[in-house]
Amino acid sequence: MKKCLTRLLTLLLSLALLLTPAYALTVDQALELLETYYYYDIPDEAYEAQTVDELIRLLGDPYTSYMTAEEYRAFLDALEGETGLVGIGVTIQRTDEGILIVDTISGGSAREAGLRSGDLIVEIDGVSCVPADDAVVSRIAGDEGTQVTVTVLRDGARTQYTLTRRLVVIPNTEVRLLDGGIGYIDCNSFGSDTGREFAQMVRDNDAKVRLWLLDLRGNGGGYTNAAVEMLNALLGPGYYLYYQSGDNTVTPVPAQKHAATAKPVIVLTDGSSASASELVASGLRDEGRSITVGGRTYGKGVAQAMLDGSVLPDYFDEDSLKLTVHRFYSGGCNTTDKIGVIPTLLVDSTYTNAVSLALCGDPSEAKLGISFRTNLSSTCRSYSIDPDTDSETLSALLSALPPQILVSYTEFPGWHADNYTAPQIAEKLGIEYESRWFTDVADSKYADAINAMGTYGLLQGDGKGHFNPAGNLTRAELCSMLANVLNVSYQGESLFTDVHQSAWYAAAVNAMAYLGLVNGVGSGRFNPSGILTQEEFFTIMGRTARFLNLRIDDYGLWVEDKADNLTLTQRGALMGYSDWARTSMAVLAWGVDESFEGDAWSKLGLLYAPLEELSPKAPILRDEAAAGMFAVLAGLDILPVK
């Protein structure tokens, strides 16, 4: 039986992992704490562990770790953020063309000399650094007080800068006002004061900006209260965080202050944006408050508590046990566990800065803009594209547009604008771009859903632009598709006798089974080549919806005397499904209202077609499955488009 902590614990959403050498904590003490507070079930073999190191390894939880006194102090210092490094004061990315400057740091010689985001360092002390690798980058480093000369390529012109290496303090959170009324806030971690400092930065500068850029790239997380305070500053009062404990108790965390701004927000993310960063990004997404540009985030949806001497003096002195105690959910009751946050515009890191700045154009001057609906409750949100945006950046932007995001174009700013899809506007403007849409789905009634899934990298097809929409779907193929959507894999012995570890689908099938989303067919077999029926598909997608969303069961559990959200017609339709499929079908049918005349996705709930068009015993086709996945992700607001 899980227990609640009787004293205040520091809850963390942190990606940081630490090595754990010597232990003051005994195995018996560690097991006692696990039985009291741990979110997951403790594996049987863990009770046979001879050391704390072995015990933690057997848990298989990368976020649970023991810290010596020295490690604990270093961990807390890292969360609070400010780090001193000797250098020229830039954050960089290695590219085949040279060292790309992602940003410059206050107090560094690079910013003082006028270097800026997007500059490309092509020579260091007169020697080429193309292509850039670790050895090349290391030549920028050196002792404090020494100088280095870099040749920078900007807009086709080369310029040399002689820069002095100095100690540069990287702040936890920093605000800068960019040209054109853009407020840029770079948040590197969520320390204990980050939320309060962020809110103050926004209040102090909001009157000076048209919109805000919130950079969460590389931010691995931190304190949950800081993330909630940040959301409070951008959204106003509400509930933007829910904790679920191991006994399924749910605790909401309220935010009560007024919003510090109503200006548009663009969030920048990458694969290292984790935990508290994901809570902020998903909270803004759920409320339709922002657009997110960059990479899919890490996918950490569990929170840790720091067990230390301040809360458990009988167990700890200056050491600590970082222990997973909750799964957390956003304000829309969605988890980021495994799946992460899928950005509105999935853009390669090379172009994240340029694309985000391109979207900060002044509406009175722009000829191009993008518009889309972020969720059912929001109005259409629009961003103007800077008229000085180069064709390479426009190409990257167009590649990131699914069919649901339209590009508006007008010959003269302020005049009537027509809307175009990405390929239409590319042809009109004569811009070449790499389309992520499939070439063989145009005749499918679900083409837009399929192409959206392709744009976000959630469907792969055959790697040559083909999806085979009319083909049947095997059980193994669905697992492969869904594992890619959920961003999961599996290592270890196969869970089924007919799924060999060397099979291309083995990791996906086992991952889906491990999560409880698919079952075998009996006798330890999975039948990977079996053709999937519609009711089998809906069963798996219903389980997936319940995995992703905390409150989905409130809408659709198939209990005869409690299914009041379903009409008699709908209940009759569901009776055509096998007993084992009805719970999932009821889950997917939540929100279905036969009299509703508004948004199509609302009318269909989490289904890709009306109930009367579905055939439970018929094979599920590939385009139907893709549309079914899109319906669940879009209906839960996990996908940022409808």
Image: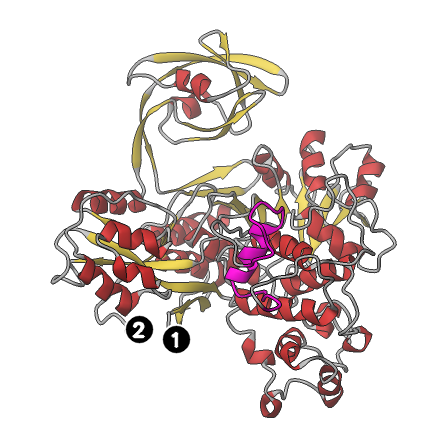
Question: Which residue carries the number 2 mark?
Answer: 2
Residue most extreme to the top = 126
Quick check: 182 left or right of 572? left
Q: Dot 2, crowdedness within 10 Å: few (<14), some or many (≥20)?
A: some
The amino acid type, in three-letter code, at marker 1 is: Thr
Above or below, 247 relative to 451 = below
Whether 388 is among the magenta residues is no
Percent x, y for residue 16? 35, 46
Above or below, 305 relative to 244 = above
Rounded to the nearest angstrom, the CA distance separating label 1 from label 2 is 10 Å
Residue most extreme to the bottom = 561
Question: Which residue carries the number 1 mark?
Answer: 249
The amino acid type, in three-letter code, at marker 2 is: Lys
Question: Which residue is located at x 41 percent, y 46 percent?
Answer: 220
- How are the colours assigned in the image? secondary structure
Q: Which mark is first along the chain, 2 or 1?
A: 2
Instruction: Please state which of the two labelled residues, at mark 1 or mark 2, is closer to the viewer.
Output: 2
Q: The residue tagged with tag 1: helix, strand or loop? A: loop
- Quadrant of the image for the N terminus? bottom left
| Predominant secondary structure, magenta span | loop
Residue most extreme to the right = 443
Q: Which residues are magenta?
A: 496-522
Q: Are marks 1 and 2 in contact (CB under 8 Å)?
A: yes
Query: Splitting the image into 4 quarters, where does residue 112 fall?
Result: top left
